[in-house]
Image: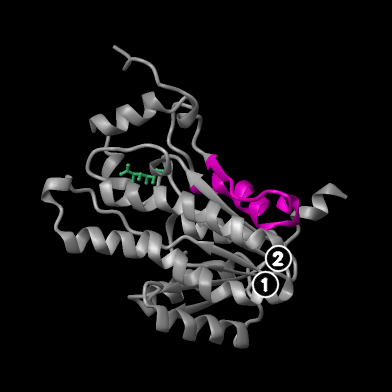
Amino acid sequence: MILDQFNLKGKTAFISGATHGLGMAMARALGEAGATIVINGHSSQGKIDQALKEYQQAGIKAYGYKFNVTDEKEVEKYIHQIEKEVGDIDILVNNAGIIKRVPITDMPLHEWEEVIRTDLTSPFIVSKAVVPGMIRRKKGKIIHVCSMMSELGRDTVSAYAAAKGGLKMLTRSMATEWAKYNIQINGIGPGYFATSQTAPLRVAGNPFHEFILNRTPAGRWGEPEELGGAIVFLASGASDFVNGQILYVDGGILATIGKPMDK
Ligand code: GCO
């Protein structure tokens, strides 16, 4: 039965970050599809505990670990610990990320490096730590959280766009090297969603808010749970012959040049 292909019962998914926002929405969807969820945070055990409470209240089996996904030694230690304490990681979602909205001329090198390390190097580090098990088992799903900025530039988000553009090519490179092990590596590309990360942009009367409403054919910001179907598809047997693709969930932004701002 085709719907059985979307069932994640018995699977374990590690979603980096996922203490809030889009990561939490995607993790909840994977949990509701039957997966056991593992999340992480690097700064606050309180945030991890609060998120675990929300997952458990939703009837989702969830575990949380506090470590920094940009630190290779910590990642190796904790991925090993997760596989020992929870089980094999069948699904990896590289979600953890940051954004800094600063014009290039005003961006200090250390801020550029922080964004690149978190949004691009960390998926490299975490995937490298998880993939040996997937290769051994000849089965696995890796999903990188990309962005509109994997395809488009925007002023003040140069480091983020460079990282997310690189993440698109890392997705394709991993698919090239690892598809032969029956591992599917794809990306999910959220458009503009109503989250804490975009809250500063969604202030009524903010020209950017009006711009996005006009630039998005659906005429609205996405709701985080609207990523659920796409992430479950990419994490499930329904996508076993899909590799190196970025699945955009963007209300149509990438389909159009846009239209003049409503007068
Ligand atoms: C911005 C936004 C975007 C979105 C998302 C779009 O500053 O333009 O934060 O980066 O968050 O990444 O796909």
Numbered badge on residue 135: 1
Identify the residue at horizontal 72%, vertical 67% (top origin).
139
Query: Disc 1, disc 2: CB below 8 Å?
Result: yes
Q: State ligand 1's quadrant.
A: top left
Residue, far left: 106
Looking at the rendered image, the quarter that the C terminus falls into is top left
| Segment tinted magenta in the rendering | 224-248
CA neighbours of label 2 inside 10 A, class few (<14), some (14 to 19), many (20+): some
Above or below for 243 versus 139: above
Q: Residue 53 location in percent, x, y?
A: 51, 72
Identify the residue at horizontal 11%, vertical 50% (top origin).
106
User: Relative to 220, is 159 on the left or the right?
Assistant: left
Above or below for 221 versus 85: above
Q: Badge 2 is on which residue?
A: 181
Foreground pick, 89 / 120: 120
- Magenta span: predominant SS is helix
